[in-house]
Amino acid sequence: MYKKMRLAWPFILPGLAGLTLFYFIPFVGGIWYSVTDGSFENRFVGFENYATVWQNQMFQLGLRNTMELSLICAPLLFLLSFVLASLLHRIRPAGTFFRSSVLMPYLMPSSAVLIIWLLWFDYGGPVNHLLSLLGVQRINWLLGSELRVPVVLLFLWKNLGFCVIVFLSALQSIPESLYEYATLEGASFRRQTFSITLPLVVPSAFLVAILSFVSAFRIFKEVYFIGGPYPEEPLYTLQNYMNNMYGKLNYQNVTTAAYIFAAIVFVLFGILFFSQRHALRRLNGEE
Amino acid sequence: MQNRHGIRLFLIRALLALMAIIMLLPMVQTFLYSFSSIPEMKAYMKTRGNRDEAEWMDAHLSPHMFSLGQYEQILIKDNTVLQYFINSVIYAAAILAGQALVLPAMAFGLSKFRFRGRETLFFLILMLMLLPFQVTMVPNVLTLRFVGLLNTVWAVILPMVFAPFYIFLLRQYMIALPDELLEASSIDGAGPFRSFLWIVLPVCRPVLGAAAALSFAEAWNLVEQPLTYLSQKPDLMPLSTVFNQLAGENTGFEFAGAGLYILPALLVYLFFQQDILSGIQLTEMK
């Protein structure tokens, strides 16, 4: 609309200054820390820090746990939100109450909900009680690798709503007439799903996939809520490693760990991006 | 045929109802428990962690006797929870006020002006949005230390003010606004500033409401930022970082603390609910 750059400056400048100061400069400047040794002379050591950090056992544990938790959470979040969105879509235009109750936890502080959560997953708590009524042995949720279950569930509880709404709005933008025509032609629900619904929601699905991973990488929150500041081994995430190194004022190792993680994250998003293009091409090709 | 369809719809509704119960129960139960007396809650919380195979915790939904004791404790007698709560209010208010000043203007600049580097800048913002907090955290600590803000409230507030996600959200909405809207007002002699204030902002009401509510939710549930940026200042922590400790200590008033913390979020949600739903739906999120 407005073509003169001069006019844009007053709008952009405050935000740009903040982004530069708090995001761009630190991100680029941090690279310097990761390639120096932090001694008094602060010598340039190339990729030495990267080699050291990469071989560090605690870093490996943190990275492995972070990736494992993300790779459990993100696909679950993606699938569950698709299922819920389709169910909500099938009872449209009713279901306002269901829509707003699924979105609600997204706005709620999970920090305050954790007390109930710990109660639910107690050894003598309601979850075990339900399981034993179904004839399953009690499980000690709050110890060892079982701890991951309440963490993942708290994460899903909190983050499901937003993804459901994004999916739902994609489903709602598909014209009703397409389905009516397909039904007239005798296409089954499954056939309609594969031939109409899926191709048209691929772009939103990609967005939800990205959102799922972005939020799954924030699982440290739930880990901290349930595992506390010094969690057990199955919950020791990258963030814990970094907080630990940061506490020891070892900036070299923290920045190095951060860039290794950034590289992995970008590779992952790259894969997602290309698989979206691939999926679109295949779905369009079939028609 | 009609009958089978009916059964299927009923099953879908039953599944959704189950989901709604799971989604809402934690809040409902927190509020209900917050009205039991402190001794009752203490005794109840003591039954946690019992490894006796024969025993179950007493599973009840509502308190045995209604009492305001927990709230009296945290609001009047003992102000530790209240102090953390006030910290949370300060962070959320400052973050939202800062964002309101900076982000809509930036989104407007990125959507309705044509200039060199606009797409690059937007691409960089997208990349920032995708980065996990851990990646920007450390460099951020270094900058904050350099400008002397580490271990002050500003360390938590300032980086959040420029949160890339909301720039993205607002820009995607604004870019879909028709140019004719602005052309009409510039014919009437209004410059970009007046058009922004009097036309763009009112039209963007739903997405602004959605962004405000989502941002509030984020600022109200802060964990990573205070833990790293305020590691030397435990008394500046927001309430969200303290619940884990509260749950462990068995003070008897943890549910009133949790209820107090959920309440503002609940009000924000009820107030902005429609905006969030329509804001997300109308935004070109691709």
Image: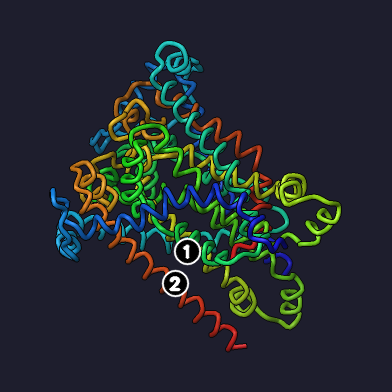
> Left or right: B85 with respect to B180?
left
Q: Residue at x 38, y 67 (%)?
A: A266
Q: Position of residue A187 (x, y in %)?
A: 67, 80
Is residue A13 placed above or below A64 in the rendered structure? above
- How packed mark 1 is, by other alpha carbons closer than 10 Å (few <14, some 14-19, many 20 or more), is some
Do the numbered discs 2 and 1 sit on residues whose CB atoms are within 8 Å? yes
- Pinpoint residue A139: horizontal percent, then vertical percent: 28, 47
Please give the chain letter of the residue carrying mark 1: A
Q: Nearer the viewer, residue A242 or A108?
A: A242
Q: Residue at x 68, y 52 (%)?
A: B278
Label 2 element class:
helix
Q: Quadrant of residue B41?
A: top left
Look at label 1 and name its amino acid: Ile
Give the amino acid at mark 2.
Leu
**Disc on the earlier residue, 2 or 1:** 1
Q: Which mark is residue A272?
A: 2
Residue at 32% over, 44% down:
B141
Foreground of the two, A62 or B191: B191
Q: Are marks 2 and 1 on the same chain?
A: yes
How far apart are the two marked residues, 2 and 1, measured between alpha carbons? 8 Å
Q: Which residue is mark 1?
A: A210
Residue lying farthest to the front in this orientation: A6
Q: Return the x and y of residue B62 as percentages of the image width and height.
A: 49, 27
